[in-house]
Image (cartoon, rainbow, N blue to C red):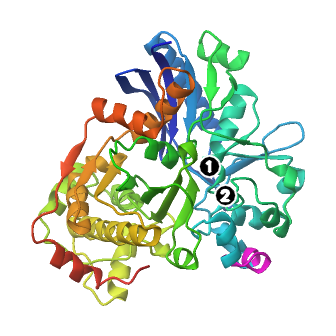
Amino acid sequence: MSELTLAAVDLGASSGRVMAARVGPGRLDLHEVHRFPNRPVRTAGTLHWDVLALYAGILDGLRAAGRDLGRLDGVGIDSWAVDYGLLDADGALLGNPVHYRDARHETAVAAVHAAVPPAELYRVSGLQHLPFNTLFQLAARRDSAQVAAARTLLLVPDLLAHWLTGAIGAEVTNASTTGLLDATTREWSRPVIDGLGLPRDLFPPLRQPGERLGELLPDVLTETGLAGPVPVTAVGSHDTASAVVGVPADTERFAYISCGTWSLVGVELEKPVLTEESRAAGFTNEVGVDGTVRYLHNVMGLWLLQECQRTWAAAGLRSDLPDLLAAAAHVPAFPALVDADDPRFLPPGDMPARVAEACSRTGQTPPQSQAETVRCILDSLALAYRRTVRRAAELSGRDVEVVHLVGGGARNSLLCQLTADACGLPVLAGPVEAAALGNALVQARAGGALSGGLAELRALLRSTQDVRTYRPTPGAETAWYAAENRVAGPR
């Protein structure tokens, strides 16, 4: 088959969308056919994902994709990481998945580290310590009735694929974010699972990107109006894994910034870096497509700006992003700086007040306007990118000649230019839809419309997708070096 029509389901923290793709030799067309909100819901003091609403949105999107394309040759799903649903012995979902921003996950950190010391956890999983990683979530709920009744754990994209196909499995790029996968063997780590007192059979068989999971069930075909059979393929189901496939690099010497609610900043490697120095620096080793390693650090990302917008909108203040960015562009550089990785910024809440408080705490004058707050956030993010790119290169031994910034942040021209200035490297911004493109590329290769490895897939991206280049401003390095010394953060 020379060309395939595909649906790439891409779920983010604030919205989901179904993208329609036509892919074949020399062709990679992608457009959105359906978008739907992803609204967390707090009940009885716990923050949940409304996973049934997400599933309904996917069905609506598949229906729209079928109308748009005339037929569907395949479906793939990617989403955020770490969160999961539990199924009972009958396959019923035991409650909505808990949101990773729910505060109770942190209550289990001490108990987990008492059972499996942090250095040992890192030697096995290679994961940056984040208090919401799946192992902490499970440990916090270990004695609950839900866990006692559970027979199968499915990460969010695996759960949705199960409802579409009936298949049970754990796609490995997302499984690698749980803290329960061995980074070297790429199998579930029995020592960690046993050390936490979790049942081994809770964790389903692992699946590789490109594996066929099954076909849309008859009731799904009826609901969506699609003509079967429609295969569902495992893609890089962690959205960052798909986004890194969607980086149009023409060299191994690149760093990437997958810039959305989170900013995932790192390099692509052949094997993990499991040194104590890497652990202390907060770097993570996650599985990528084609056996690669996503060696990266999680930076708080555009969440800082998104929460400011939400707070300002609720107060009746200006919250339109283009207007805010235009005003911020006229603010002199470095009015104030914060550590973008400060855990105080993690929960939802009044972000402008938290930014101001962080500035006061470090002896700086807090931002005096919305424009100054936005400029403080963007300068601070660019500084975090500078620090992380340089540290990733140092710890991995991988030289970096160019930075690829993909995802929604590629639309933010001010942030892209600040990143080029901060890193002292060219920044290639785009594609915006890197995760959906990577999703579609893996599906197309599995379906026989494309061949080759990541180099060949990325060559197709370069020939079909728009990318904008930002070059460092001459003489900017001195100012960024001075700014770096003003902010306390991981080095």
Q: Quadrant of residue 354?
A: bottom left
Q: Residue at x 54, y 44 (%)?
A: 289
- The location of residue 237, given as percent across then percent down, is 58, 42
Observer able to see residue 262? no
In the rendered image, the quadrant that contains the C terminus is bottom left
Q: CA distance from mark 2 to mark 1?
A: 7 Å
Rendered residue at 44%/64% (across/down): 300
Residue occupied by mark 2: 178
Image location (x, y in percent) of residue 362: 34, 88
Q: Which residue is mark 1?
A: 174
Please indicate whether residue 187 sits to the left or right of residue 414 in the image.
right
Magenta-highlighted residues: 111-118
Amino acid carrying mark 2 in the image: Thr
Judging depth in this view, the residue of 46 and 202 nearest the camera is 202
Mark 2 is surrounded, within 10 Å at the Cα level, by few (under 14), some (14 to 19) or many (20 or more) other residues, namely many
Q: Are marks 2 and 1 in contact (CB under 8 Å)?
A: yes
Does residue 466 appear to the left or right of 274 in the view shown?
A: left
Q: Is residue 71 above or below residue 55?
A: above
For the point 37% across and 81% down, which residue is it?
Answer: 357
Residue drawn at x 38%, y 44% as measured from the top left = 247
Most distant residue in the bottom direction: 363
Picture layout, residue 365 above or below residue 299: below
Image coordinates of residue 331 in percent, x first then y, are 14, 68
* Residue 321 can be seen in this image: yes
Of residue 30 and residue 105, the one placed in the foreground of this image is: 30
Picture disc at residue 257: none
Magenta-colored stretch includes residue 424: no
Q: In front here: 210 or 81?
A: 210
Camera-side residue: 248 or 298? 248
* Type of the residue with mark 1: Asn
Residue 214 to residue 409: above or below: above
